[in-house]
Image: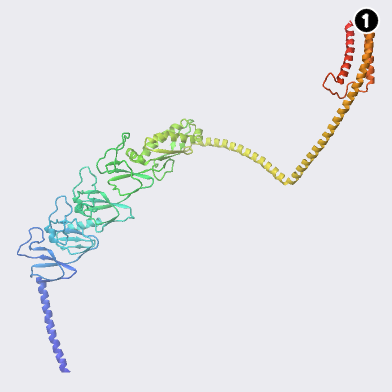
Amino acid sequence: MQTLLSILSAILSQAAFYLGGLAVVLILVWATNKWTGVAVYIKNDEYGVVEKIWSFGGSVKSGFMSLNKEAGFAPDLIRGGLHFFPPWQFRIHKQKMITVQSLAYVYARDGKPLPAGQTLARTPDGVFFEDARGFLANGGQRGPQRQIVRQGVYAFNTALFVVMTGDKVYAIDVGADHEALDRMRRTIEDRNGFEPVIIRDTDDVIVIVTVHDGPVLEHGAIIAPAVGMDRNDLNTFHNSFQDIDHFLAAGGWRGRQEQVLVEGTYWINRLFATVETRPKKVVAIGTVGVVISYTGDSGVDVSGDDYKHGSLVDRGRRGVWADPVPPGKYPFNPFAYNVIDVPTTNFVLRWIESRREDHGLDSNLAEIRLITKDAFEPILPLSIVVHISPENAPRLIQQFADVKRLVDQTIDPMVSAYFKDAAQNLTMLQLINDRSKLQEEAKEAMRGRFAAYNIDIQEVLIGTPRAGVGDNRIETLLDQIRGRQLAAEQQETYGAQRRAAGEQQKLNEAIASAAQQTALTESTIQITVAENQGKAALMRKQQEAQGIRVTAEANAYQTVQDGESKAKAIAAIGTAEGAAIKAKVEAFTGEGARWQIQQTIAEILGRAIEQTKQPLVPNIMINGGGGDGESGSNNTTMLTALMALALDNRAARHDKDP
């Protein structure tokens, strides 16, 4: 057992001796390599920039990059692994791989110098920054580079290229350009250059681009025209300023650009172009946009010979465009175009104190002070509804520059003057009572005046005139008018009440009549029955009277017949006696004969009257027609003749009396 332990102890002692020797050897090797730089190990996430300390070929003649084995920084890199170099000739600068999260800028320390007026260095065609030798050999320029680096992991020769990312600067310190690099970094940070330009569709904005490289604008130009817009021309299409070389090849100008950026993501070198955000131009519903262009060629006037207030040009030309843009959203560059909104729907202008419309066009309008014919001084509140047609909007803007100026400088004085003139011919009472008439007259009178300024007037609305502060005369007049109107209304009310009372009476009668409808019906029936009974009794009486009349007529006829027969008999007797008397008379002469005749006639007549039973004048006289053959007529004639004779004799006697 002791023997075994002794053997192990000897082995361990021998191993420790050899290990110690190996360690010493390794330490000596490390120290020698550190001192001489013979071997270099590069990790796979690193790369090495080779610096040649001395060379039999001497030093570089310009710059500090060694392209021909001179002393200096070699353009080529060494990558991961173990590398061996001659002792004391090279220094290897190990660098971590360059990681770009978003956007990185490159500054070249060597290369051709920039010409006068050039801001950023041009990168040779087909060469990327990982090829330092190709960059220098093909004319790469020193200074800030036009080309930027996008996301990725790169191995750049950081002795030649300084790479700036948003969080780090990758560079080998050469101690000569700290100030320039610091200034460059601050500029990029101030312009938010380490992030792409992102325009979201929800923002409704555009981005204005100002280019800081290229030829300056021509004299008189205020904005650079758009160039390189043809996608089919691969040599000039710069894809919205993302390819600087193509932009310059297309003839791009330094300065603020007419072309704007809309929704999207743009990788723009912020040392080449700065950006600023502006809202899109929104032409609202109910308006049109009149475009004033500050860029483009001078166009031909298309306004016509009858328009004397300036020129209108076609779209794309410099000046006021003859065709307005309809409602919508437009990416108009506000530095190249001015778009003036002109309302095309009806809008109201108010000459009313403390009342203004949202459009603000009437913000400077005040109520109109009038003087009436009877020396009242009312204040007239007024509203006018106007309309501007879309085709007239450019003419209006060309003449007045904006609608607000038109309202303040033309419409306001024109309207005020019209109503002041009109008020001088009206009394205060007429101004109040004839307001609607005044409105119509004003609308017709001002329609032609407004048309001269390319405006259509729709309505004129006049409010109630009011008095100024401290003036009670108008209120007194209104009180009088209200008193008269109240009296008239009371009269109308009393008349209505009277008519209502009459209708109420009729209603009450109707109600009472309805309540007694049964009794009224029965009484009506009774009245009808009584009328029918009366008519029947009347008919009976009429029948009885008719019978009595017929009977009386028959009796009278019989009596007449009897009287006539007797009269005929008496007449016959009288005729005979007359003949006798005549004979007697003839026998007498003188007055005595005449008296004898009269006496004889009187006796005959007396006897006839005594003998007849009928009255001398019948109660009922029936005229039979007066024919010669009727007896009644003969008797009457005879009697008449006798009486006439008697009277004739009497008259003759009197004629003889003195």
Three-letter amino acid code of the residue under disc 1: Gly
Residue visible at 6% across and 65% down? 55
**Element at label 1:** loop
Observer-nearest residue: 416 or 438? 438
Whether residue 99 is situated above or below residue 241 in the rendered picture: below
Q: Which residue is mark 1?
A: 590
Whether residue 569 is situated above or below residue 198 in the rendered picture: above
Q: Whole-percent x and y of residue 220? A: 22, 42
Observer-nearest residue: 555 or 148? 555
Q: Whole-percent x and y of residue 640? A: 87, 16
Res 615 seen here: no
Observer-nearest residue: 335 or 379? 335
Total numbered labels: 1
Image side of residue 261 versus residue 249, left or right: right
Task: Say which quarter of the image contains residue 619.
Answer: top right
Res 20 seen here: yes
